[in-house]
Amino acid sequence: MTDIDRMWGTAEVSEQRDGISIITGKAPVSTLNGYAKEVAAYTKGLGTLSVSLAGYEPCHNAEEVIAARAYSPENDLRNTPDSVFCSHGAGTVIPWHEVYNYMHLPLMGEARDEDEAGAPVNAPTSKERAEIFVTTEEIDEIINKTAYANRSGRKGSYKGISEAMRERRRIGGKPINPAPTSYKGTPVKDKYMLIDGYNVVHAWAELNSIAEKDMGGAAGRLMDIVSNYSGITGIKTILVFDAYKVPGHSTEEIKYHNITVVYTKTAETADRYIERYAHDNGKKYDIIVVTSDGVEQVIIRGAGCTLMSSRDFEEDCKRKSEELKSMKLPDSVRITE
């Protein structure tokens, strides 16, 4: 039992029978590794060690592990430690050390009862977090529950003038008739597509494999694909990349062939830029947003925009490219891959 304490574990004698003791407990895998040989050695082969997975608990030497890995959470763009709070229809990025100043709900761990404290929490894996797409029906349900929560269920009375009333009410002996109206049809809006660049990079297997070696190369490859897609579909496209951790960086817009590439300003994420653009221009343009960020999808849907997941966008790009290839084009026209 002293050995277990030395290995940052806990143990107790659970049973004694015929001069043999059974000790049960828990210890980190990193310190318990190889201990079975020690047990066999100091018990002269009479003792055995059986182990099973007990779950995940806080690391006993977290600072040492982090230092050995040279890991910096603030520089991890894929799994950022920051939080996103919704404010006035747009997402606001809050640094991890300021979250307690903004949060209005208790943490999940603090809200549980003591009986539930030891229950394992099935958190989503990093792969699952990278591709979380909410269906349109689910988003509409969320919006309806929040936007109309305080609205009364009573129907308002109709105060219009019926046909019989129009006949009875006369001015100068003439019945009152509504002014003639003409239906002009629904105006056609310009179609825009906004793409969360790094969200797409991490969602596509091809781009993600490139990003593991060269993030700039993956972004350049996506720019070429999006440029081709925009040329085929005729949709005006804005590709947005995060630059919110670059000190002193202002919003940068560059023209890349036929598309616009945006690098966000310091302290602004790509999803926040897209949310603000959709909120400001949702009534003016027919906007399609490409993302698989669950929170962003709800906000974008609430602004009246069309959603497309990163995976669906990948399939549509391939489909449009194949359709173009099947067309008979002049020899002077070339399709780049």
Image (cartoon, helix red, strand yellow):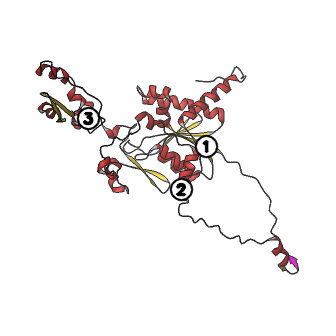
* Label 1 – label 3 distance at C-alpha: 43 Å
Placement of 142 over or under 77, stated as above or below: below
Does label 3 or label 2 sit earlier along the sequence? 3
- Disc 2, SS: helix
Q: How many marks?
A: 3
Amino acid found under the numbered disc labelled 1:
Tyr
Does label 1 or label 2 sit earlier along the sequence? 2
Report the residue at 82% width, 71% height from top.
163
Q: Which residues are magenta?
A: 172-185
For disc 2, the neighbor class at 10 Å (few under 14, some 14 to 19, many from 20) is few
Q: Is residue 15 left or right of residue 218?
A: left
Q: To which residue does mark 3 refer?
A: 66
Of the pair 131 and 245, the residue shown nearer to us:
131
Q: To which residue does mark 1 refer?
A: 192
Dot in front, 3 or 2: 2
Placement of 254 over or under 115, stated as above or below: above
* Label 3 – label 2 distance at C-alpha: 42 Å
Estimate the x, y position of residue 51 in percent, counting from the top left: 25, 27
User: Residue 249 appears in which quarter of the rendering?
Assistant: top left
Q: To which residue does mark 2 refer?
A: 145
For disc 3, the neighbor class at 10 Å (few under 14, some 14 to 19, many from 20) is few
Amino acid found under the numbered disc labelled 3:
Ile
Q: Are marks 1 and 2 in contact (CB under 8 Å)?
A: no
Amino acid found under the numbered disc labelled 2:
Lys
For disc 1, the neighbor class at 10 Å (few under 14, some 14 to 19, many from 20) is some
Q: Residue furthest front?
A: 18
Estimate the x, y position of residue 120 in percent, counting from the top left: 34, 40
- Disc 3, SS: helix
